[in-house]
Amino acid sequence: MKKFLGIAAAVIIVGVIVFIFVRYFYVFGEGVKAGELNYVVKKGFLFKTYEGKLIQSGFRSKIPNTIQSYEFTFSVVNEAVAQKLMLNSGRNVELHYKEYIGVVPWRGYSEFIVDSIIAITNEAK
């Protein structure tokens, strides 16, 4: 019986570790988003993180008979990337991001983490 409980405990512990890794640290997807950079701000109570919003061209509607623009809300971990984005609000940008399934507080409020800037154009729409 002790051997069974030991094996069961080990399986549960390994399962919890795998779950936490996949949920919070495994890169689920990555890609590029382009649009007009609305803002990037540093905010938070305990963990100060960089949060931003990109407005993409086009419209979508969550509720019938309404119009809403596409918005990409993201977090930035790299301070140099965040500072460069802060200086370029209102410009068209292309951002490379990584998507995680879960959010950890020291990484930001969003599951989308921008890790690099591909391009910045001087013209704002």
Image (cartoon, rainbow, N blue to C red):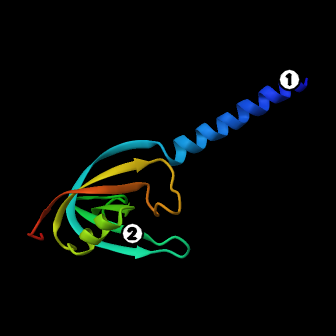
Question: Residue 12 versus residue 125: which sits nearer the camera?
Answer: 12
| Badge nearest the viewer, 1 or 2 | 1
Label 1, secondary structure: give it: helix
The residue wearing badge 1 is 3
Residue at figure coordinates x 9%, y 69% from the top left: 122
Q: Is residue 68 visible?
A: no
In the image: residue 89, left or right of residue 46 = left
| Residue 106 drawn at (x, y percent) | 51, 63
Residue at figure coordinates x 78%, y 26% from the top left: 7
Residue at figure coordinates x 42%, y 43% from the top left: 27
**In the picture shown, does residue 31 fall above or below 9?**
below
**In the picture shown, does residue 99 fall above or below 107?**
above
Question: Residue 60 versus residue 42: which sits nearer the camera?
Answer: 42
Spatial CA span between label 1 and label 2: 49 Å
| Residue 90 drawn at (x, y percent) | 19, 73
In the image: residue 22, left or right of residue 97 = right
Quarter-wise, where is residue 66 in the image? bottom left
Which badge, 1 or 2, comes first in the chain's sequence? 1
**In the picture shown, does residue 43 fall above or below 73?**
below
Label 2, secondary structure: give it: strand
The residue wearing badge 2 is 50
- Alpha-carbon neighbours of circle 2 within 10 Å: few (<14), some, or many (≥20)? many
Q: Is residue 91 visible?
A: yes
Residue at figure coordinates x 48%, y 47% from the top left: 101
- Classify the position of the C terminus by image quarter: bottom left
- Alpha-carbon neighbours of circle 1 within 10 Å: few (<14), some, or many (≥20)? few
In the image: residue 93, left or right of residue 70 = left
- Classify the position of the N terminus by image quarter: top right
In the image: residue 26, left or right of residue 72 = right
- Amino acid type, callout 1: Lys
| Residue 97 drawn at (x, y percent) | 32, 52
